[in-house]
Amino acid sequence: MPNASPQEVASKLGSGLLSFPVTHLSDDGAFDEAAYRENIAWLGQYTAAGLFAAGGTGEFFSLTPTEVEQVVTAAVQEAPDGLPVIAPAGYGTATAVEMARSAERVGAHGILLLPPYLTEASQEGLVAHVKQVCAATGLGVTIYSRANAVYTEAAVAELADSCPNFVGFKDGVGDIEQMTRIYAGIGDRLTYIGGLPTAEMFALPYLALGVTTYSSAIYNFVPQFALDFYAALRRGDTAFVINALNEFVIPYCNLRNRKPGYAVSIIKAGMKVVGRPAGPVRSPLTDLDDIERGELTNLIKRVS
């Protein structure tokens, strides 16, 4: 999508399921670019509406800025034509600005702005942070509201009025009232993305709030199941959705909740189970143990 506007990219993202691929690492923890490229090509056989390179599932928090650029470059080059690749930006404002410019330089189609590193911030500070990133790039910017960067409806409205290339809001909080306030006030000006861990758990109630898509981490290792779940959600097949929640998603979340950080670790474990290993997670995350991988194997068999 070389000539697509920020609004066109955002519309494309809102039209289907979103892929958040892991970042492949070798046993010594280095970025395994060849394996990553091969996996992006494999995922490209399926019909995701967007690919978010080096996002939360891709261990953004453990990658250097140089590695982030390498990952985004590889994704841009390997993704099928017409599939927008969204790059991450984060940490402090100066670093986020540099990352946004890097993403545009290597051909990404949009930016996912993750929360600033470590520090708490006022709403005024967060708004200034987003405005500077938006001003630094011609790409569309989606903000990720979670952790120490939870945006109020007033902040989102100010950004929507001030920044033409602010095009998306990704929710990682799960506050239904807050989402209602934001959607009621801003409506279709933005594309809304579900961004809670294992977003399938929240997809049904969020659909009525304009959240037409979400980041599917399980798409990494059971892509067809993830797509079938999304299709059932959009066509209103509640019976299918509830059955899938009980059969796979809820027990999967129970396993994911065993330890902090398993929201990423369990994805790499799942890829190993299906014969597409992506290497270990980087510290401070920890990998699933053999017993937990066995439990995950049994769950995957239910939907494979």
Image: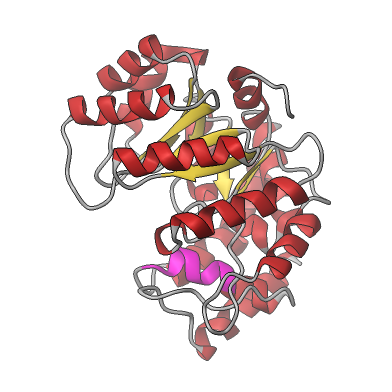
Of the 4 image quadrants, the one containing the C terminus is: bottom right
- Residue 263 image position (x, y, % from top left): 46, 63
| Relative to 212, residue 66 above or below | below
Position of the N terminus by quadrant? top right
- For image coordinates 43% across by 27% down, the residue present is 136
Was residue 114 drawn as part of the magenta stretch in this picture? no
Work out whether residue 224 or residue 59 is closer to the camera in this orientation and state it.
59
Range of the magenta residues?
A: 261-268
Asked whether 265 falls inside the magenta stretch, the response is yes
Viewer-closest of 145 and 112: 112
The x and y percentages for residue 104 are 57, 35
Q: Position of residue 283 (x, y in %)?
A: 39, 76
Q: Position of residue 108 (x, y in %)?
A: 62, 38
Relative to 34, 266 lies left or right: left
Residue appearing at x 59%, y 85% in the figure: 294
- Looking at the picture, does residue 223 appear above or below residue 278? above
Residue 46 in view in this figure: yes
Residue 260 in the image: above or below residue 101: below
Coloring basis for residues: secondary structure
Residue 194 visible at all: no
